Image (cartoon, rainbow, N blue to C red):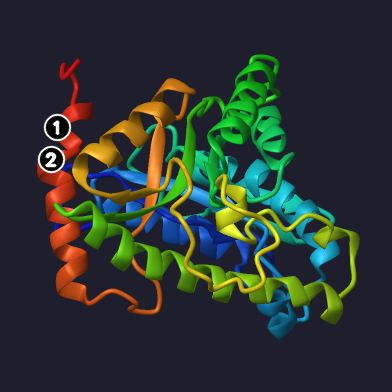
Amino acid sequence: MATSTERIRVGHGAVVCVPEMNHPIRVAERAAVLDILSGGRLEFGTARASTYTELGGFRASPDATKMSWDEYIHVLPKMWTEDRFSYDGTTFSLPERPILPKPVQDPHPPMWVTVTSPGTELDAADRGIGCLGVAAASFREQERRTGEYRKRIQQCDPVSTVVNDQVATMNFLYCHEDDTVAISVGGAMFATFGILNSHLLWTREVFPTSAYQSLGNLAPGAGAGGRAGSESPGEQRPIPDGIAIGDPDRIVEAVKVWESIGVDAINFLVNTTEAIPQAAVLESMRLFAREVMPHFAPGAR
């Protein structure tokens, strides 16, 4: 994608900052290469991993991931900007070395952290990096998080010489000229995602830890304003407010509300487990580009 496009930003949904899974030198190198290949269009996302489902295969402790993530985001800017670098930390250490190549962007690609549970947006603000929401949230909840982030980042101690003060949120997208069709097809995809995501609940039974007290990426329907406590996580229920499933007019209105509460960007989940045929996904994206995106182009309002 980086070499086949010229203008769009290329974003990591996020790199898991856990030494057992991704050594920081390799993370720095791969990011720099992608920034070079894209001509300086990389947006660099970071994460602690989602659950023990991921971490267990590498025998990494969920209780240590917050610490390792914090060390990564402090050292990566130095790896990208300093000629030689060494580090003696708690979760990893490395002798003095030149870390090559260097990114194209000066001083380095914008940094983000994924936000699933409330509170991580404050970690992002304190460190001067972008808030990358990866859990569906209601308008009210996102407005609260965004407001707290904006206030907190004004007094941040940034991990780099530059501050990325942007807020992005996650959403679902299925756009069709017929609103009824859109809700039927997109709603099925939305429900399928809910079934699969609900499986994360049982991670706490496998590895009981305070790290899993709040799994904010569960039950997207409830998180986005839908009913909580449904008997079946896969039950198809009314599309919650703010979810971008519907005809172009419905989606335009939803995006305008997200914009009004201070969100800078929306990342759309366009399919899950091929619940929607690929041809229909592409047509949805084309219709979104034709009928929705122009409303938010510079100078459109």
Q: Position of residue 263 (x, y in %)?
A: 46, 29
Q: Which residue is situated farthest in the left direction here?
A: 290
Q: Residue 243 or 179: which is nearer the viewer?
A: 179
Amino acid at circle 1: Pro
Residue 62 is at least partly visible in this image: yes
Instruction: Please state if 97 lies on the left or on the right of 211 as rendered.
Output: left
Instruction: Please state if 124 lies on the left or on the right of 210 as rendered.
Output: left
The answer to whether mark 1 and mark 2 are in CB contact below 8 A is yes
Residue ID for mark 2: 291
Where 193 sits versus 121, above or below? below
Residue ID for mark 1: 294
Q: Dividing the image into 4 quarters, which one contains the N terminus?
A: bottom left
Q: Position of residue 59 (x, y in %)?
A: 78, 81
Which element type, helix, strand or loop, lies under badge 1? helix
Which numbered tag is attached to residue 160? none
Q: Residue 13 or 299: which is nearer the viewer?
A: 299
Where 253 sits versus 286, above or below? above
Q: Quadrant of residue 218?
A: bottom right
Instruction: Please state if 70 lies on the left or on the right of 2 as rendered.
Output: right
Residue that appears at 44% across and 33% down: 107
Q: Position of residue 232 (x, y in %)?
A: 62, 74
Tell me if mark 1 has few (under 14), some (14-19) or many (20+) residues whose alpha carbon lies within 10 angstroms of its own.
some
